[in-house]
Amino acid sequence: MIYKVAQAYYEDGMTQQEIADRYGISRIKVSRLLAKALQEKTVQIRITPPEDHFTGLERQLEISYGLKEAVVVEGKPGKQEALMESLGRGAAGYLLSILQGHEVVGLTWGRALLSMVNAMENLLLPDLQVVQMLGGLGEPEAEFHGTDLTRRMAQLFSTRPRLIHAPGIVRSDTLCRELMSDIQVKSTLDVAARADIALVGLGLFGPGSPILKSKKILSEADKKLLTSLGVVGDISLRFFNGDGEFVSSEIDKRVVGLSAGQIQNVPRIIGIAGGREKYRTIRAVLRGKLVHVLITDHLTAKRLVNENN
């Protein structure tokens, strides 16, 4: 009977109730017989990974750094544009696979998030809330500006965006307090603080990084201060050191966005980054457990796993 029930369920695709009706037994007994089939190895299940995916590497990354999930995409040395597209597709696919349609999704800014939005398909999720976590950085007309990314993602999901019509960093803590007390800015950040999911770029703080190249985000004094504090990167303009510890400074008082503590309270923080130049930044993020999900390229993932073994 165990064999017959198992064959009907696994090979013929019959439901447990259909099997019960066929053999004149209860559905509960069918369930027990199927459990016994597994226990006695009458049925043996084998999981076969996809041939073109890095599932083993993802698993190693999750175990090594205590991640909820890792998504590894193919990356080629020196091909930055191709890497961004690959990361974007991976991030878009992952996000669409976990959304149920009622979440609050927070966004920061940057090229990785731009690639993700570019790779997304339209999906009708009118109950979803898409919210900006940080005021605008860089040129407002830039494609990777936080306001534009939030607006575009909301349009893809047929829902309305919650935007912050203010700069991400201002010249004084007094001005920052005034902006943060503005009803529109405050209400948007209140929604962002309740986010179920945060999509964040892992910003590089070092040679070639947009944040150092720009003259409109940080002053020269700011850059010197952060360098002296051993900063290697940022999440939503909250800076951290090589051990993944958020570093406090007077700059924090001028940022119009969620605090480091509020970001850490988000249940699922998805970090998107890859490439050799961002390795130190990604490693620091994993050391400090600043994200729950990492989307990166296979070369970076291999290096991270090898270093932690």
Image: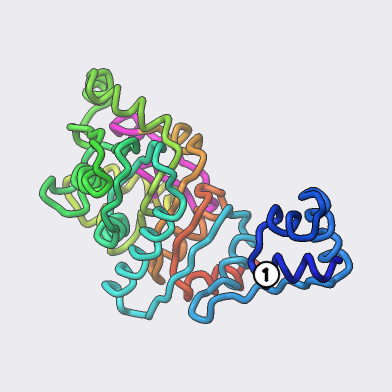
Q: Is residue 68 above or below residue 60?
A: above
Check residue 70 for magenta coloring: no
User: What's the residue type where badge 1 is placed?
Assistant: Asn
At horizontal 35% and vertical 65% (from top left) the residue drawn is 89
Check residue 256 for magenta coloring: yes
Extent of the magenta region = 234-257
Task: Give the percent coordinates (x, y) of residue 299.
Answer: 47, 76
Q: Is residue 13 above or below residue 143?
A: below
Looking at the rendering, which quadrant does residue 175 occupy? Answer: top left
Q: Nearer the viewer, residue 128 or 232?
A: 128
For label 1, the residue is: 309
Task: Give the percent coordinates (x, y) of residue 74.
Answer: 42, 76
Is residue 218 shown to the viewer in this render?
no
Task: Give the percent coordinates (x, y) of residue 38.
Answer: 82, 65
At horizontal 14% and vertical 52% (from top left) the residue drawn is 142
Q: Residues within 10 Å of mark 1 (few under 14, many from 20)?
A: few
Q: How many marks?
A: 1
Q: Is residue 38 left or right of residue 200?
A: right
Q: Is residue 48 left or right of residue 156?
A: right
